Structure formats: C-alpha cells, structure tokens
Amino acid sequence: MNLDNLKSGWQQYKLKNSFDSIEEKEILSIIEAGKRRPAWQAYRRITQNALIYAFLLTCLSGGCTI
Amino acid sequence: MNLTSKTEFIKLIKEYQRLINSLCNIYFASEEDRKDSRQDIILQLWQAYPSFRNEAKISTWIYKVALNTILSKTRKDKRRISTDSLSSYDFSKIAIPVFADDEVQHLQQAINLLQDLDKAIVILYLEGYSHREIAATLFLTETNISTRFSRIKIQLQKIFKAKQNESR
C-alpha cells in the first residue's frame, strides 16, 4: 500500500476546509474566555491541597487516632 | 498578553485555519464536536503562544498542539464514529460532502476507519514529515512510529480491498 497516493487527496481536503472561515470575533471570544485564573485562585487551590495532604499524612502516620 | 500579540495570533489562526478545520473535520463527525475541538485547539495555541520561539516551523507547532489536543479530547469522548471491525462496517455511515471527489473520498474513508493515533500518524506522513518528526510531534519513539506505520499500511490495504469488493 503506497500512502503517497493519498497525498493529493489530503491537499484537496485541506483546500476544501478553507471555506469554513474562523471569524476574528470567534478567536477573540475564545482567548478572552480562556484567560488564566487569577493568582489568588491558584494560591487558594494550593493551600487547600496542602491542607488535605497534611491531614492525610498525619492520619496515615498514626498521628490522628479517631 | 498585549494587543499586538492578539493581532498577530488572530492573523496566524486565519492563515492556518484550513489546517485546523481539516483536523477537526477528519476526527469528528458532529458539527458540535468539530466546533468544540476547534475552540480547544485555538485556546491551547493561545496559551502556548508565548513559549513558541520560532525554533520549529509554525505549521509543525500547530500540528503538534492541535493533534495532541484532539487526541486528548478523543480519549474522553465517546460520541465519535466508532472503529468497528472492517467486515461489519457500513461505509454509508461516513459523512462525505456531496462535492467530494474520488481522491478526497478515498482518503476520508480510509482515515475514518483508523484508530485516532494512527490517523495522526497518517496525516503527518501525508504532510511530508519523517518518522523522527512524527515521533517528536506525538511524543512517541521512532521505533513505535515505524511499527505502527507498517500496521497502518496493512490495515489500509484491507480497507481498500473490502471497499473494492463491496463496489463489485
């Protein structure tokens, strides 16, 4: 099977897909909506995870007897 | 990122939109999935844009980000065309545009029946990338690509044979 025979098909396929234009508005809305979370949110998540980890570590090492 | 970056980025997406559209259309059957994945790709490209240093060709970078975004989406997504066994596959299920000519139809039918990762390998090969470059783009080893490539060739041969038998 020679895959090179499919090369012109792929080029034509790409050409046909250029008709569905991506509008500037669409791109802007995607990148605006996907902005990174503010730093304080990241710190909050890190603190939460650190607390959970510390709690689990304490329990598993026998420090917390319920 | 500043306004200049945004303008540059929009220009870049416009320039490579047919590549992005082609990848989304070849992987997803429904319009909704196509749009979703297009958005995901644009967002991933935007987030990776500051770290892009022109060390690679822009198209290579776009392929890398786009294909890996699609592959991670398809791993989660169950709504895609399933890769049924060849003998039981109904070729009429494949969505082919009315205007598609033989070569494009041929390509779509073949690629649609491959596994997701194999599709990516074939697409990159058709774009003229070497096994080494394909391996780097898909985070695989060169040996892995070579092995998969041999399997793909056999699989495609079977697909075309089955298609020929069906049309007789």
Image: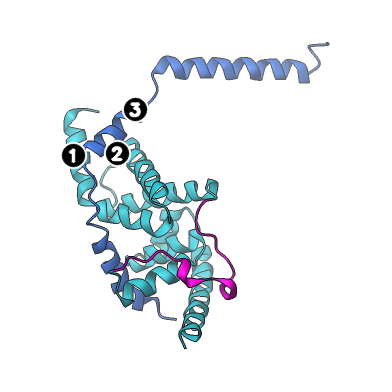
Chain B hue?
Answer: cyan
| Residue displayed at 45% across by 63% down | B119
x then y, percent, for residue B38: 35, 46
Which amino acid type corresponds to the residue marked 2 in the rendered image?
Answer: Tyr
In this view, the mark in front (1 or 3): 3
Which amino acid type corresponds to the residue marked 1 in the rendered image?
Answer: Glu
User: Height in image: B61 above or below B90?
Assistant: above
| Residue for badge 1 | B8
| Residue for badge 3 | A35
Number of residue marks: 3
Which chain does the numbered disc 3 sit on?
A
Q: Earlier in the sequence, mark 2 or mark 1?
A: 1
Q: Secondary structure at mark 1?
A: helix
- The chain whose colour is blue is A
Which amino acid type corresponds to the residue marked 3 in the rendered image?
Answer: Lys
Contact (CB < 8 A) between labels 2 and 1?
no
Contact (CB < 8 A) between labels 2 and 3?
no
| Residue for badge 2 | B49
Q: Secondary structure at mark 3?
A: loop
User: Looking at the image, which is closer to me, B119 or B39?
Assistant: B39
Badge 2 and badge 1 both on one subunit = yes
What quarter of the picture does the N terminus of chain B occupy?
top left
- Residue B57, can we see it? no
x then y, percent, for residue A34: 35, 31
Q: CA distance from mark 1 to mark 3?
A: 17 Å
Which quarter of the figure has residue B123? bottom left
